[in-house]
Image (tube, helix red, strand yellow):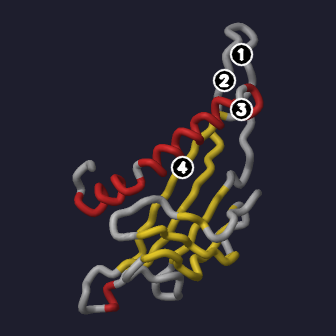
């Protein structure tokens, strides 16, 4: 599995100016993933904390533990009996404060992106999967600030 290149340039967000994130290899929770800890911040990110034991800031990329293959084809109908999904995930964990006066109220926020791929499609029509990923990454990059505002205000921005 190919890893990330450090530093990662962050998407546009209100309150962050030219954010970058320096990554250090970390141990993923499971053998099917790679993980990095954010060990330094670049740009202007006032009040943002890099990774620490009490305030994690990690990104994990996971692939399926067992790659699923297509089921058998019905010889009469020509239709696959079952088409299982192979799931890939990107998870970001970030320690956040929940109360300005009590440090003990720090908690971990989680963001998970799941990509479910019907088995067999990666070999039959990989360009369609690449287009799906391309749109997702481009849309998230374009909508980064709006998504941040939506999460903070609970109103679509």
Which circle, 3 or 4, is nearer the viewer?
3
**Which is more N-terminal, label 4 or label 2?**
2
Circle 3: element type: helix
- The residue located at (40%, 49%) in the rendering is 143
**Which is more N-terminal, label 2 or label 1?**
1
Q: CA distance from mark 3 to mark 4?
A: 18 Å
Circle 1: element type: loop
- The residue located at (34%, 90%) in the rendering is 104
Give left or right: position of 50 versus 5. Answer: left
Give left or right: position of 42 versus 63. Answer: left
**Which is more N-terminal, label 4 or label 1?**
1
Dot 4 surroundings within 10 Å: few (below 14), some, or many (20 or more)?
Answer: few
- The residue located at (47%, 59%) in the rendering is 11
Which circle, 1 or 3, is nearer the viewer?
3
Q: CA distance from mark 2 to mark 4?
A: 24 Å
Where, by quadrant of the figure, is residue 119 drawn?
top right
Report if the CB atoms under discs 1 and 2 are less than 8 Å apart.
Answer: yes
**Which is more N-terminal, label 4 or label 3?**
4
Give left or right: position of 144 versus 35. Answer: left
Which residue matches tag 2?
Answer: 81
Q: Please tell me which residue lies in front, 148 or 27.
A: 148
Which residue matches tag 4?
Answer: 114
Where, by quadrant of the figure, is residue 132 drawn?
top right
Dot 1 surroundings within 10 Å: few (below 14), some, or many (20 or more)?
Answer: few
Which circle, 1 or 4, is nearer the viewer?
4
Which residue matches tag 3?
Answer: 126
Q: CA distance from mark 1 to mark 3?
A: 24 Å
Circle 2: element type: loop
């Amino acid at each position: 599995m190919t890893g990330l290149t450090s530093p990662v340039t962050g998407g546009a967000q209100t309150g962050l100016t030219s954010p970058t994130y320096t990554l250090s290899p970390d141990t993923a929770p499971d053998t099917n993933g790679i993980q990095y800890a954010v060990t330094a911040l670049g740009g202007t990110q006032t009040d943002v904390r890099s990774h620490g034991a009490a305030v994690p800031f990690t990104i994990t990329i996971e692939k399926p533990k067992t790659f699923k293959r297509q089921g058998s084809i019905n010889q009469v109908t020509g239709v696959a009996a079952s088409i299982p999904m192979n799931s890939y995930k990107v998870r970001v964990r970030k320690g956040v404060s929940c109360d300005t006066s009590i440090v003990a109220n720090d908690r971990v926020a989680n963001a998970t992106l799941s990509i479910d791929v019907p088995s067999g499609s990666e070999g039959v029509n990989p360009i369609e999967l690449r287009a799906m990923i391309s749109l997702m990454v481009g849309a998230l990059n374009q909508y980064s600030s709006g998504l941040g505002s939506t999460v903070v205000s609970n109103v679509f921005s």
